[in-house]
Image: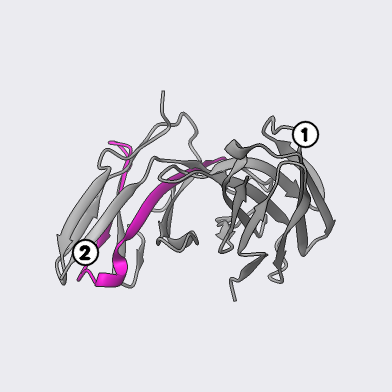
């Protein structure tokens, strides 16, 4: 079974509007971390936002917020006031074993290609 | 500063060539990673170095040989590659501290073409 599922291969949003990118995850660990990365066509993976499994508040970073619903195992990314520069591939990722002190790999979803329309 | 640098940006090589990819970070991170990414796909983990020791090798063919000369540097030596090895190669690093989120920060990648 897939550990990270992103069901939207492509999304379109009008400039200045908000958009939600979906991510659901599957883990039996109590401790885990959820990440969102942005990858423009240039290729670099840019870290956007992090949510720990024990964090009670939803994470926010500027125009990015993470809608964390633990019981539903979802970690949706909300981008407010979309800009043309937000057009990119967005990956949701999970690391199991939060704070374990050892290097743990990330499991990535298949990604969502976001296009912001002028 | 969350910068990871990679050189070269682009590399074209023949199947008989030997080349190396280089990755550098000066954030004091103790874990470094190599990923391979095909177009429109998520990155696939290849290798993880933890405190300069190879800790994860995801059954990567021996024509890829990683090296971690010191805590800031990570190399990927390439030899006798196949055309299907053409991809974007991403390097990442993370702090690897027990109480940290241990976020991985990525470099800009090397686009490799094997002819």
The image shows residue A17 at horizontal and vertical percentages of 14, 67
The image shows residue A15 at horizontal and vertical percentages of 16, 70
- Numbered range of the magenta stretch: A70-97
Indicate whether residue A36 is drawn in magenta.
no
- Horizontal placement of B2 versus A85: left or right? right
Say what secondary structure mark 2 lies in: strand
Image quadrant where one finds the N terminus of chain B: bottom right
Give the chain letter at badge 2.
A
Which residue is most to the right? B69
Nearest the camera: B44 or A41? A41
Figure check: A6 above or below A91:
above
How would you rate the neighbour count of disc 1 (Cα within 10 Å): few for under 14, some for 14-19, many for 20 or more? few
Numbered tag placed on residue A116 in the rendering: 2
- Horizontal placement of A76 versus B75: left or right? left
Nearest the camera: B21 or A66? B21
CA gap, disc 1 and disc 2: 42 Å
Kindly indicate whether the residue at mark 2 contacts the one at mark 1 (C-beta within 8 angstroms).
no
Numbered tag placed on residue B62 in the rendering: 1
């Amino acid at each position: 079974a897939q550990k990270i599922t992103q069901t939207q291969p492509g999304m379109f949003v009008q400039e200045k509007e908000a958009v939600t990118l979906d991510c659901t995850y599957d883990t039996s660990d109590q401790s885990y971390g959820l990440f969102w990365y942005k990858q423009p066509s240039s290729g670099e993976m840019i870290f956007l936002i992090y949510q720990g499994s024990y964090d009670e508040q939803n994470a926010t970073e500027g125009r990015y917020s993470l809608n964390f619903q633990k019981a539903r195992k979802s970690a949706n990314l909300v981008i407010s006031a979309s800009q043309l520069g937000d057009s990119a591939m967005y990956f949701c990722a999970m690391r199991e074993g939060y704070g374990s002190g050892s290097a743990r790999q990330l499991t990535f979803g298949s990604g969502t290609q976001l296009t912001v329309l002028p | 500063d969350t910068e990871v640098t990679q050189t070269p940006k682009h590399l074209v090589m023949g199947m008989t060539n030997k080349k190396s990819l280089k990755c550098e970070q000066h954030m004091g991170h103790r874990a470094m990673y190599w990923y391979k990414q095909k177009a429109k796909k998520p990155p696939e983990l290849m290798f993880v170095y933890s405190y300069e020791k190879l800790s994860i090798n995801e059954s990567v063919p021996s024509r890829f040989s990683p090296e971690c000369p010191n805590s800031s540097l990570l190399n990927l030596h390439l030899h006798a590659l196949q055309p299907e090895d053409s991809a974007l190669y991403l390097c990442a690093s993370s702090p690897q501290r027990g109480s940290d989120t241990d976020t991985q920060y990525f470099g800009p990648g090397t686009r490799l073409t094997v002819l």
